[in-house]
Image: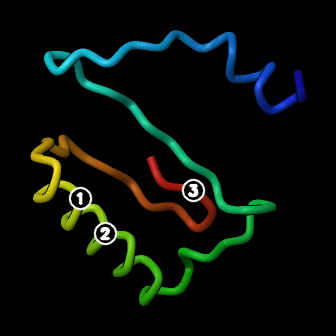
Amino acid sequence: MDTKHKFHSNLSKFNENSHAHFITTKTYKNYPYFKDERLCQIVFEELEFYREKLGFYILGYVVMPDHVY
């Protein structure tokens, strides 16, 4: 098992519609892509697209220079 899969195997996994999910993601090598307002706009548009397409609620989000949560 590689390190990536070993790290994530310890996390609890569930997929219940009645639960809120907390998701965080980092950029490759922590590069600050989201200092660029145009790239932030792409993130916002993608979140809205998939929210409408898949029918989920977004309770909130924060975009930082090198991650989104």
Q: Is residue 21 left or right of residue 57?
A: right
For the residue labelled by badge 3, is the local secondary structure a helix, a strand or a loop?
strand
Residue 34 tag number: none
Amino acid type, residue under disc 3 in the picture:
His
The residue carrying pointer 2 sits among few (fewer than 14), some (14 to 19) or many (20 or more) residues within 10 Å by Cα, namely few
- The answer to whether marks 1 and 2 mark residues whose Cβ atoms lie closer than 8 Å is yes
How many tags in the picture? Answer: 3
Look at 37% across and 79% down and name the residue there.
42
Q: Nearer the viewer, mark 3 or mark 1?
A: 1
* Whole-number angstrom distance, CA of label 1 to CA of label 2: 6 Å
User: Which one is earlier in the sequence, the residue at label 2 or at label 3?
Assistant: 2
Asked whether the residues under the numbered discs 2 and 3 touch, taking CB atoms below 8 Å apart as contact, a structural biologist would say: no
Q: Which residue is mark 1?
A: 50
Element class at badge 2: helix
Cα separation, mark 2 vs mark 3, equals 15 Å
Q: Amino acid at mark 2?
A: Glu
Can you tell which of label 2 and label 3 is closer to the viewer?
Answer: 2
Circle 1 — which element?
A: helix
Disc 1 crowd, CA 10 A, few/some/many (<14, 14-19, 20+):
few
Residue holding disc 2: 46
Residue 68 placed where, x, y %?
Answer: 48, 54
